[in-house]
Image (cartoon, helix red, strand yellow):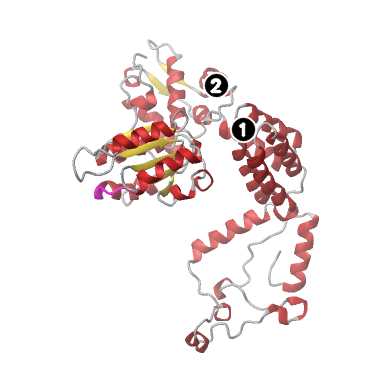
Amino acid sequence: MSSTIPLAERLRPQNLDDYAGQQHLVGKDGVFRKFIKSGILPSIILWGPPGVGKTTLAYILANQLKRPFYVLSAINSGVKDVREVIEQAKKPALPGSAAPLLFIDEIHRFSKSQQDSLLGAVEKGWITLIGATTENPSFEVIPALLSRCQVYVLEDHSKEDLVALVHKAIKEDEVLKTLKIELKEEDAMLRFSGGDARKLLNALETVVGNSDPSKKIVITNRFVADTLQNTLLRYDKSGEQHYDIISAFIKSIRGSDPNAAVYWLARMLEGGEDPKFIARRLLILSSEDIGNANPNALLLANSTFQAINIIGMPEARIILSQCAVYLASSPKSNASYMAINQAISTVRQTGNEPVPLHLRNAPTKLMKELNYGKEYQYSHDFPGNFAFQEFLPDNLSGSNFVTFGKNNREEELKNFLRARWKDKYHF
C-alpha cells in the first residue's frame, strides 16, 4: 500500500454525520449537535474505553466550531507545556472571539500539579478543556477540575458499528478501494480489535499489507489469526492488552484460582500497570463477586487501595498479592450485584411509583394533616426490633430483588429474614 498515513487516520470522520456510534451523544437530538449548533461548548471530559472515538470527537468539535485547537498528550507533556499552551490561548485572534480548545489525551495520567495548572485557565475562560480518559474521572481527575467540567460517557462500539466500519474502509478508503478485497469472515478481526475501532482498522491494514496486491485478497478468520497472532504477545498498559489481562485476572479470582490470579497480577505489574487501577478492580470485585458471602473481602480490598497509595511500588505488589489471594480463596456470591441490577431494571420499567404515606417524611403541619407518616410503625418499639409492614410502593408489594447465594454467611442472612417476613418474600 502506497500511503504513509495510517488507515485509521485516513478514515477519521470530519463531521458528526460520518461519526460511528455514540448516538446518545451525536444523534439527531444529541448534546454535541446542540453544542455545535449553539456555538457554546463547556469544558468536558470524555470517558470511555480505547478506540471509541474520543479523540475524533474532539477534532470534530474544533473543526465545526472553528476554534483554535491545541493538543497535549498526558504521557509526554508536563506543567511547562501546559503553561505554554495557556499563554498562547490567552491571546485570542479577535476581541470577543470564543476560547480556544485544549485537548488533553489520557488526562488521567496527569499528576495533581499538572491538573492544578489547568484550573485558572478553565475558570477564567482562557481555554475550553476537552479531556479524554479511559479511567473513571471521579478517581483520576482532581475534584476542583472535575467540578468545572461536564463528563460524557462514550460506550463500546457494537458489532454492527465495527463491521460497518470495515466495509466502509474497503469501499471508500483511497488505497483499499483500488484493491480487490473480499471480506469473507470478520470474527477474528473483531476479536483481535477488542472493540477498539482504531485497532480494528490497524488490523485490517496489517492483513491487507501482508497480501499480494496484484491478486484478490480474501480475508478469512484463519488468515487474520495467522497474520496478527504475534501482536498479542506483549502487554501494553496503554490499551493493547490492558483489558484482556485485567479480564483474565478478575475471572481467575471469580473462579477461585489464586495461582492464576497472582500470575495475571504479575503480568500487569511487570508491564508497568498502575497499581491503583488494579486495586480499584479488586474493590469492585469484592462486592460484585463475593459480597455478603464474606463481608471482610470489601474491608480488605478497601484497605489494600488505601495502603498502596501510601506504600507505592515495588512493595505495593505484596499488598496486592495478599488481597488477590484472599479474594480468590473466599466464598463467592453475586447476590448484591444481581439485586441492584434487578431493582434498577424495575425502576426503569415502572417509573416514579409514589412513596407509601406511612413512609413519608412529615416536617410541616400540613403534611401531618395529610397523614404523612401517620401509620408508620417504629421498629424498635416491637419485639425483635421488627414490625411487619409494607416498605415498597403498593404496585410493587412483594417484589423480590434479593436472592441469596448458597454459602454459610448468606444462609444466616436468609434465615434471619425468613423468620421475619415469612412468605412475603422468597429469599
Q: Secondary structure at mark 2?
A: helix
**What type is the residue that disc 1 sits on?**
Ile
Rendering coords of residue 145 (x, y %) = 44, 47
Q: Is residue 10 visible?
A: yes
Any part of residue 422 in sight:
no
Residue 39 belongs to magenta span: yes
Q: Secondary structure at mark 1?
A: helix
The x, y position of residue 421, in whole percent, is: 72, 73
Which residue: 69% across, 51% down? 298
Q: Residues within 10 Å of mark 1 (few under 14, many from 20)?
A: some
Which residue lies at the image location 52% right of the left edge and 24% below the top edge?
A: 221
Question: Of all residues shown, which one is farthest toward the left?
Answer: 94
Identify the residue at image location x=63%, y=62%. Answer: 401
Q: Magenta residues, as a range?
A: 37-42
For label 1, the residue is: 245
Q: Is residue 152 left or right of residue 178?
A: right
